[in-house]
Amino acid sequence: MSVDVMGALQAATKGLLYMSETDAPFEMVHWPKQAATLTGSDVLTLVGKTKGDKVDEISVEEFFDDPTQDQDWHDEAAKQAVQRYRDLLAVLKQHLTDIKVFRIGEVRIEIYVLGRTADGDWAGIKTNAVET
């Protein structure tokens, strides 16, 4: 897989946290030469979960909707975080195609933002959320 993709994703996520009821960093994900499409069932298998685990697929636009929106109440740090999320979305769209977001679990949720690389691999980022 292209080192450029992983390097760009690492640079875009360095120090960036996904905020929910807990703040979580992002990790890189890479699965070489998987099927042409990726389903929730495929992701469960690839991450070692059981077929019975809850998995939802949402669009990349839905996932990034809140973190890329400016709010009147944002301070300077929050405004910078919004811009970093916009930059991350741009990096994902620049380097990956067929981007999908998979949410695994119900309260403690693993989130995978995955797309196809030019080499045909699946790659992206992973983070966690707590939603009660």
Image (tube, rainbow, N blue to C red):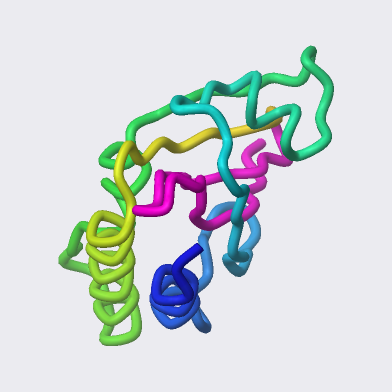
Q: Position of residue 47 (x, y in %)?
A: 75, 39
- Residue at 83% from the left image edge and 21% from the top image edge: 50
The answer to which image quadrant residue 63 occupies is top left
Assign the magenta stretch its main secondary structure: strand
Q: Position of residue 92 (x, y in %)?
A: 33, 58
Q: Nearer the viewer, residue 19 or 115?
A: 115
The answer to which image quadrant residue 101 occupies is top left
Q: Nearer the viewer, residue 45 or 56?
A: 45
Does 18 sit left or right of 43 as displayed?
left
Q: How many marks?
A: 0
Q: Nearer the viewer, residue 105 or 89?
A: 89
Q: Position of residue 23 (x, y in %)?
A: 61, 65
Does 43 sit left or right of 86 as displayed?
right
- Residue at 16% from the left image edge and 66% from the top image edge: 72
- Residue at 26% from the left image edge and 46% from the top image edge: 65
- Residue at 65% from the left image edge and 19% from the top image edge: 41
The boundaries of the magenta stretch are 107-132
Furthest residue to the bottom? Answer: 76
